[in-house]
Amino acid sequence: MKLPATYPLLAVLAAGLPAQQVYVGANAQAPMVVTASLPGNIVTDSQPAGQLPIFGGVQSQTAGFESSARVNWSSWASTQAATFSLDAQTVAAPVVGAVATSGEHNVLVYFSASAPLAARFELSAIVSASAGTPTPLARIDVHDDGISELSESWPTGSVSLTLGTTPLPVRVRVRAEAQPGAVVSVHLEVRLVPNNSLQSGTLVQGCNLDYLVATPSFVGTGVDFRVASAKTPNVLVLGLQAAPVVLPAIGGLPCLLLPRPDALILLTYSQQIQHVSIPLAARPLQVFAQSASLTTSSQIGLSNGLLISAY
């Protein structure tokens, strides 16, 4: 089907599309126990098995903080990503008989969406341990099928899939144990991002300090725009073609307005996000984007200029 020439712009600016929701939740499969000990002084604390709050932690330490153990977790979801992270750290005093343990923690994390969408898991681990300590456990198993896509010896991973309304399980396992005088820490992160078949690149540099950021979004297989570090309101300029216009330079920096101004959208503060949907029916499509603002000398300042290519 041949689309009318105006369709792509109407598609990317469509405001009536239903919001795509992504959800994340976590369940501890057993009590999450942390223990810090010195000879004659053992301190233990735990988080009960079951549903975990979106963020929290458990910590234990000996009376003088010579030995300590903790575990922390957090989960959150937005239009741009859904993340679960788990941190374990142990410190053992340089005393014979001192030990600190965190785990083994066994957590099932569930991801789901309000409608099927293309997504990608980005898995990462940061493991640090003093010489001579037991190797920490750091495992992530997407689909909970017994095959770990990430381990302490393979600290990164990526899994592309279609996420649907049925919760998809990801098993996260961590253990950190410190012997006398040692410090051990493990950070695991499961990050779900859109897999929108988009490429973004900078074509021109800006002539002010504003920086335009484009982040793939779960909504409408599109992108979220934001102007970082903006101190004044900006106008987001979107165009389906490049039509460069040279503006007066600022501080010796050349100002080149890149997009043909097919759409102008006011961004009133630096954290405001403007969503642009790029549905499959509008592809292939290129969108040129740049932001403009007035400087203190009433000149027009421009951010970096981007090209978003959707396939």
Image (spheres, rainbow, N blue to C red):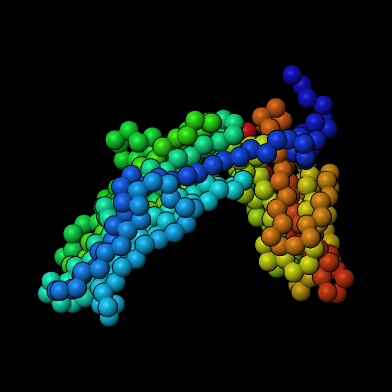
Give the left or right position of residue 151, taking residue 207 as reference. Answer: left
- Residue ranking furthest to the right: 298
The quadrant of the picture occupied by the N terminus is top right
Q: Nearer the viewer, residue 43 or 90?
A: 43
Q: Nearer the viewer, residue 265 or 242?
A: 265
| Residue 295 in the image, given as x and y percentages of width and height | 82, 70
- Residue ranking furthest to the bottom: 64
Whether 181 is drawn above or below 27: the answer is: below
| Residue 9 in the image, given as x and y percentages of width and height | 79, 37
Residue drawn at (49%, 53%), measured in percent from left and top? 54
| Residue 29 in the image, given as x and y percentages of width and height | 33, 44
Give the left or right position of residue 86, taking residue 297 as reference. Answer: left
The mark total stands at 0
Q: Nearer the viewer, residue 112 or 61?
A: 61
| Residue 239 in the image, given as x and y percentages of width and height | 79, 44
Give the left or right position of residue 154, taking residue 3 as reference. Answer: left
Whether 57 is drawn above or below 52: the answer is: below
- Residue 91 in view, yes or no: no
Residue drawn at (77%, 36%), measured in percent from left and top? 16
- Residue 24 in view, yes or no: yes
